[in-house]
Structure formats: structure tokens, C-alpha cells
Amino acid sequence: MTAIRRIGASAVIALVFLLVQAAPASAHTVSGQGATNYRPVLQSITPAVAGLHAKTLDVGSWIEVSWTGPGDLTILGYQGEPYLRIGPDGVYRNKLSPATYLNVTRTYYGTIPSYANSKAAPVWEKVSGGHSVIWHDHRIHWMGGPTPPKVRSDPGSPHVVFPWTINMVAAGTPVAIRGELQWVPGASPWPWIALVVLLGMAGIAAGRGRHWSTQLLVLLAVLIVTDAIHAVGTGLDVPGSGLHKVLLIFAGSYYSIVAWVLGAVAIRLLARRNIDGLFAAVFAALVIGLFGGLADVIALARSQVPFLFGMTLDRVLIAVSLGLGAGVVVGSVLAFRRNRPPMVPTGDTDEDDDYLPDPAVGTAGAGG
């Protein structure tokens, strides 16, 4: 197989790899909630009760309630039934509450078991020994379906989609957590698209330049670091323990980890001006550009993103992944075409092996 076909094969293998992995994965959105314009806002806890605290997490995908007051705090489900209980000895969940099964995932609509009965006496099962609980509550976030009429008629303006309430009983006192789901229009994506184009041009210019190996390895290093920060920032925004977050970062980025490793190989080879480093660079940049950039490109036009380090940095990282990803791919192809070793005839009649690299030139490239 000639060298020019090897670089094409690298791209094809990368694309097949991406398509296979795309089914179970959704870019770096390991939390289950992607960028959106819907924002749940917790407004009040009425009446104020000492020891009771609540907050929404992960763009409203979760709500967390903690209780350190005397006695028990009972959180009520969708039909007013006891759903969760926090007390001195830990957190319990009512096995007979329909909410126990409806809240399994953020968008779960599965069948409620026949034994679940909101009118029956609770059957408590212990969840943890702590004093706080996190769950998907479908009352506070947008569950999909037709766009609300007020949003559809004027998507460029902010709206209150609906108010929401979660009722509970704190040591015998009825308490209500109230808030509203808001529509917050996103900003224009065009400045970020312009940045993507500029970064892509930088990658192309690097591949065409005299110092192609140095410039491409620098851009590839920036691309790898960018994707790693993107993965970490997304994983750390998910509720849970530190170990849980670390596991999610690796689980949600296993395809990128392959790209990082091959990218490191490419950097090492390019540092030696070895033209073979361009093959690994194509694979690494293509994977990062598609999964770290294109798959998350919608965040450039949304107002809410599941990212720990802030919306602006998230958009910068996505633009860099997409722009440099494309630029390094194209730049690597151009660098190969300009610097590949001259081919000498072998005399063989096999079409694929008629020419081999001239040993006088080697694999470091013919160009400066």
C-alpha cells in the first residue's frame, strides 16, 4: 500500500471508529443533559426551616435536598405520596411510590410496577447513610415535546415556561420549594463560527509552511489539552462523589483517550520531523474535532451548558476543538503531499507496489 493511501486509510478508520462509538456516546455530555435554553430557577423555600437546603444541578437535570434539622424530612412524589425520607439515620426511598420508578433517569417514561401504589403505606428502603439526596425531578425541567407556544412565537425573548413546586414535610411542618422554568435565549453563534474558521486556517497554514512539523505538533498539543479540559469540566459538573466523577470522565471520553494517545505518538514523531507522524495526527484531530467539537457545536448557540468552568470557556474549547481539529487534518494532508519522499520504480507489475520511497531521502520528508 502506498503512503498516500495510508493517510486515506487513517481517515477512513477514524470515521468508522467514530460511527461505531456514536451510538452509546454523546460527545462529552456524560451527565445526560446537553446544552439548552431552558433554565430551572429555585426561588423560595416556604416557610424557611432551619437545616433545610435545596439547589438544582446540571442545568436542572437534578435537584439536591439536604436536611440536618430534628426529626425526618419527607419529600412528596407526583401524587402527593411519601417518596423520599431524610432523617438522623440516613436517606430512605419509598419502594411503593410511583416517583421511585419515574425518576430513574431524566427522561424516563417506563412502566410503573403493578405493586407501586401511592395510596399504600410506605415501604422504605435505605439509600444511603447521609443527610442529602439527589434525584431527577420531572417537575422542574423541560421533558421535551412540542415547543411551548410563547417560546415558539418569540424565541428571541426570555419567558417563564411554567412555575413548579415540590412539596415536603419537615418534622411535621408542610414546606414547599418553589421555582420556575425559564426560557433564556442563546447568543449568536457567528463570532464563534468565525473563530472556528480562523483556527482552521491556522492549521492549513501550518501544513503548508516550511516549519510544518513544529507548527502542527504545537497545534495538535493544544488540541489534546483543549479536549482534556473539556472532558474534565463536563464530568466534574455531574453530581456525585469525586470517584464517581472521575469514572464518568473516563467513561464519557474513552474514544478521546485513544485520540490523546495517538496524538502523543504523532507529536513525538513530528518532533523528529518524521512524516509518519502525520498519519496519527489525522486520526487524533479527526476524533477530537468531531466528538469534542462538532458533536457539541449546539452549545455555541445555547444559554445553558453542563460545564463546570463556565459557558464562555466551554464555547472556546468547542471552537478550538472544531477549528483546530479540521485544520490539523487538512494541514497534515497538505504537509504530507508537500513533503513525502520521492518514489522510485521497483519494476514490479503489482499496481500497489510499483513505487517505493527513495531510501536516499528516508521518512523525514523531502521538504524543509
Image (cartoon, rainbow, N blue to C red):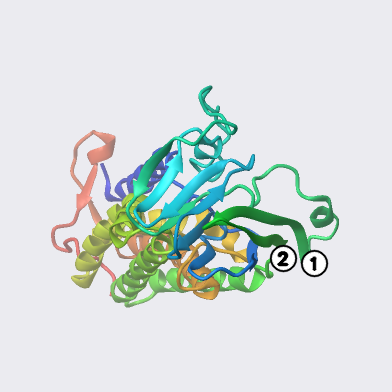
- The residue that mark 2 highlights is 185
Instruction: Give the answer, above or below, for where 314 lies relative to 82.
Output: below
Give the residue type that dot 1 points to.
Answer: Ser
Residue 97 x, y percent position in the rendering: 53, 36
- Can you tell which quarter of the image residue 205 is in? bottom left
Q: Is residue 225 left or right of residue 349?
A: right
**Residue nearest the viewer, comparing 222 with 336:** 222
Residue in the image at 30% along x and 59% along y: 246
**How many numbered marks appear?**
2
Whole-angstrom CA distance, mark 1 to mark 2, is 6 Å
Q: Would you say the residues marked 1 and 2 are in contact, meaning their CB atoms lie under 8 Å apart?
A: yes
Residue 187 x, y percent position in the rendering: 68, 70
Say what secondary structure mark 2 lies in: loop
* Name of the residue lying farthest toward the left: 359
Residue in the image at 51% along x and 60% along y: 58
N-terminal of the pair, mark 1 or mark 2, is 1
Q: Is residue 15 left or right of residue 306?
A: left
- The residue that mark 1 highlights is 157
Residue in the image at 39% along x and 69% along y: 226
Work out whether residue 302 can be spotted. Answer: no
Pointer 1 local density, CA inside 10 Å: few below 14, some 14–19, many at least 20: few
